[in-house]
Image: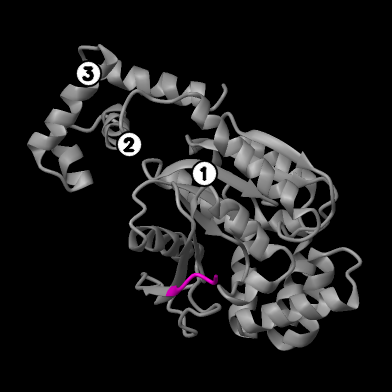
């Protein structure tokens, strides 16, 4: 059953999103351009989402200007895309979530995790680079953006060859049709230009969420070495080399990609916390140095409720001070990350 499409306002314009499955929220940023409904029929995309939805509440969305979102976007900048991701999470009532990001979406997911550590429980990146300028020489990047902008049809065929090495005629037609439905030439070229111009190397060391970096060893669109660089810059990140050459996570042996993600995320279950989900949120904010009043404001709860949560946390952890709570949070996160 195709999940219903919902809409929410964002700083960059009105966007379409959908929710499927049950379990902890998993926010997906699937890459360059998208179409909530159309992509479900493309290669293994629908099966991939269904696999994740067996364990998670999968939240997908179309960027402003793409798919079923408003086609006259106000802001396609990198910061605008980060703000859009958070607005969708808020609309889906996902206060804290796991985030999956692929390719360009991986940069956005990493930025969300780095800038808003209280929101991201765990992070999974696929086929991502830290600096878009490393994807190709400047003249090549410029020519690709210009071709996509000037001749969307020819640009689509070229991009298919970049994403899927030696594609069949049917694969070229399927991917080209999906991308044509997903965005106009103007939006697609602008998003590509933003990707090439984005450098998140300074953000990656700030990520504190458990992180997995998945990368196919034969990926020619984004070389494996670029994935290694990303994993090396994120504290405690785990790199998962995958066989294959397709840049698309839902093409080729996509079940391995899904199983690797689920296996990594399932590891957290081996270290169950003694606290409730809300108490974990409060403990995390205590670790950030927030007072009870500040915690109440952040979580939109009464100050007395925040105070009660802190007291319950002290009792459950058998500690006396806020500093000891912070120490427990740090130790728990390290154990959960396998560090």
Give the quarter of the image for residue 338: top right
Residue 142 pos. (x, y %): 73, 72
Question: In this figure, which residue is indicated by the disc labeled 2?
Answer: 277
**How far separated are the C-alphas under marks 1 and 2?**
27 Å
Residue drawn at the location 63% of the way across and 67% of the way down: 32
Q: Quadrant of the N terminus?
A: bottom right
Numbered label attached to residue 314: 3
Up-down relation of residue 307 to residue 29 (above or below) = above
* Colour basis: one colour
Task: Write down the region rendered in magenta.
Answer: 1-5
Residue 69 pos. (x, y %): 47, 79
Residue at disc 3, secondary structure: helix
Residue 191 pos. (x, y %): 59, 71
Question: In this figure, which residue is indicated by the disc labeled 1?
Answer: 203
Residue drawn at the location 57% of the way across and 49% of the way down: 200
Residue 145 visible from this viewpoint: yes
Q: Residue furthest front?
A: 1
Near mark 3 (Cα within 10 A), the count class, few <14, some 14-19 or many ≥20, is some
Between tags 2 and 3, which lies in front?
Answer: 2
Instruction: Please name whichever residue, 129 or 246, is drawn nearer the observer in this view of the structure.
Output: 246
Residue 202 visible from this viewpoint: no
């Amino acid at each position: 059953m195709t999940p219903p499409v919902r809409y929410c306002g964002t700083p960059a314009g009105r966007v379409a999103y959908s929710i499927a499955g049950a379990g902890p929220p998993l926010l997906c940023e699937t890459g360059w351009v998208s179409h909530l409904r159309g992509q479900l029929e493309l290669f293994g995309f629908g099966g991939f989402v269904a696999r994740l939805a067996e364990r998670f509440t999968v939240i997908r969305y179309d960027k402003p200007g793409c798919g079923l979102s408003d086609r006259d976007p106000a802001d396609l900048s990198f910061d605008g895309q980060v703000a859009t991701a958070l607005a969708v999470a808020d609309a889906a009532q996902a206060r804290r979530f796991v985030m999956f990001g692929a390719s360009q979406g991986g940069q956005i997911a990493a930025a969300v995790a780095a800038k808003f550590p209280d929101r991201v429980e765990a992070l999974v990146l696929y086929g991502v680079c830290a600096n878009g300028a490393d994807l190709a020489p400047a003249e090549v990047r410029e020519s690709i953006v210009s071709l996509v902008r000037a001749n969307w049809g020819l640009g689509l065929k070229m991009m298919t060859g970049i994403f899927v090495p030696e594609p069949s005629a049917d694969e070229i037609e399927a991917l080209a049709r999906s991308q044509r439905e997903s965005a106009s030439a103007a939006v697609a070229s602008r998003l590509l230009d933003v990707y090439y111009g984005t450098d998140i190397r300074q953000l990656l060391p700030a990520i504190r969420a458990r992180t997995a970096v998945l990368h196919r060893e034969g990926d020619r669109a984004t070389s494996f070495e670029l994935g290694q660089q990303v994993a090396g810059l994120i504290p405690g990140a785990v790199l998962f080399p995958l066989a294959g050459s397709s840049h698309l996570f839902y093409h080729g042996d996509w079940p391995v990609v899904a199983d690797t993600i689920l296996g990594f995320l399932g590891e957290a279950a081996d270290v169950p916390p003694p606290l409730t989900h809300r108490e974990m949120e409060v403990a995390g904010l205590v670790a950030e140095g927030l007072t009870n009043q500040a915690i109440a404001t952040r979580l939109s709860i009464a100050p007395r409720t925040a105070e009660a949560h802190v007291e319950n946390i002290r009792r459950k952890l058998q500690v006396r001070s806020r500093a000891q709570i912070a120490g427990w949070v740090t130790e728990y996160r390290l154990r959960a990350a396998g560090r």
